[in-house]
Amino acid sequence: MPDTSADITYTLENLTDWSRSGPSLAVIGNPVRHSISPQMHNAAIAKLAEKDERFSNWKYFRFEIPAELLIESLPIFREKGFLGLNLTVPHKEIAVPATAEIDPLAKTIGAVNTLQKTENGWKGFNTDGYGLAQGIKISLSKEIAHSDFVLLGAGGAARAAAIQAIHYGCATLTIVNRNQERLGKLVNELRPLAEKSGVELRSLSPQSIDELHSDCLLVNATSLGLKPDDPTPIPESKIPENAYCFDMIYNPPTTKLMEIVRLKGGTTANGLGMLVHQGAKALSIWTGQDAPSEIMQEAAEAALAKH
């Protein structure tokens, strides 16, 4: 049994030898070594333990497990005393068939990022959309409701964001993506939900964007911006004036898209708030307590500063 340190990235081999006595939580991904979730969650758990000693022996860890080994690892996590798990790329969709029960919103999204141990197996949730909504509300002082929501991307993160935008009652939802086949598939899947909610839905390629509303809510769910030489997800000339931009990327803390939006008089925020609040929601599910999101934000910022 290796030393159970939250600073170590563990593997399936370590899991099979796991013998920790206290309740455990973990984030699983591949890769996952960059994850700051352990620092964020352990700070919150320590805060909860100050008022409730039940949480004094709880601890959150990090496991790097390949996609092809995820399904066989999930029962082992239950056997080894893990009460909850967070899932990152590429595990969110893979885990769905392995859940004994799934929250309705997660079922609609088709992906889970949070698993809770139950008597019958794992119950799946998706807290990404909640994290996005809270991140936008707190970081941008902007509500999704009644907004002109412009979503960049059509992958898994974009799907969760789109469903949450419809759920929160955006006025219009415009999805922009380079791959038209993927875009068309996502829009076709979303159309019944949008029509039922009275949300105007449209799809565009980056080059075919017409004039966007000056106060639109521009959300980047693509990976463009992770590298310094990445282009903006849409042409710079198409970025509207005075937009509210939420970029799901949080490292680097400022992307080229955010820089251009600011130059055009807009307001920007990176995705750290989304990470914090999706994590806070997950911790609330596991503990039954309100998670101290301010403590999680501080811990996340401190962890990023060390990277």
Image (cartoon, rainbow, N blue to C red):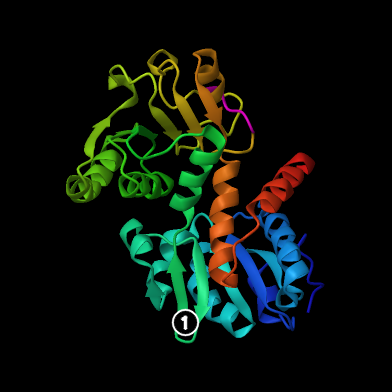
Compared to residue 54, the image places residue 95 above or below, namely: above
Q: Position of residue 258 (x, y in %)?
A: 54, 25
Tell me the crowding category of disc 1: few under 14, some 14 to 19, or many 20 or more residues within 10 angstroms, Cα based: some
Residue 13 in the figure: left or right of residue 108: right
Residue 63 in the figure: left or right of residue 158: right
Q: Position of residue 186 (x, y in %)?
A: 28, 45
Q: Position of residue 286 (x, y in %)?
A: 57, 71
At 54% from the left and 13% from the top, the residue drawn is 263
Magenta span: helix, strand or loop, mainly? loop
Q: What residue is disc 1 on?
A: 121
At 56% from the left and 51% from the top, the residue drawn is 277
Compared to residue 178, the image places residue 16 above or below, namely: below
Q: Quadrant of the N terminus?
A: bottom right
Bounds of the magenta span? 253-257
Q: Position of residue 72 (x, y in %)?
A: 51, 77
Residue 95 in the figure: left or right of residue 258: left
Compared to residue 199, the image places residue 124 above or below, namely: below
Residue at the extreme front: 51
In the image, what residue type sits under mark 1? Gly
Residue 14 magenta-drawn? Answer: no
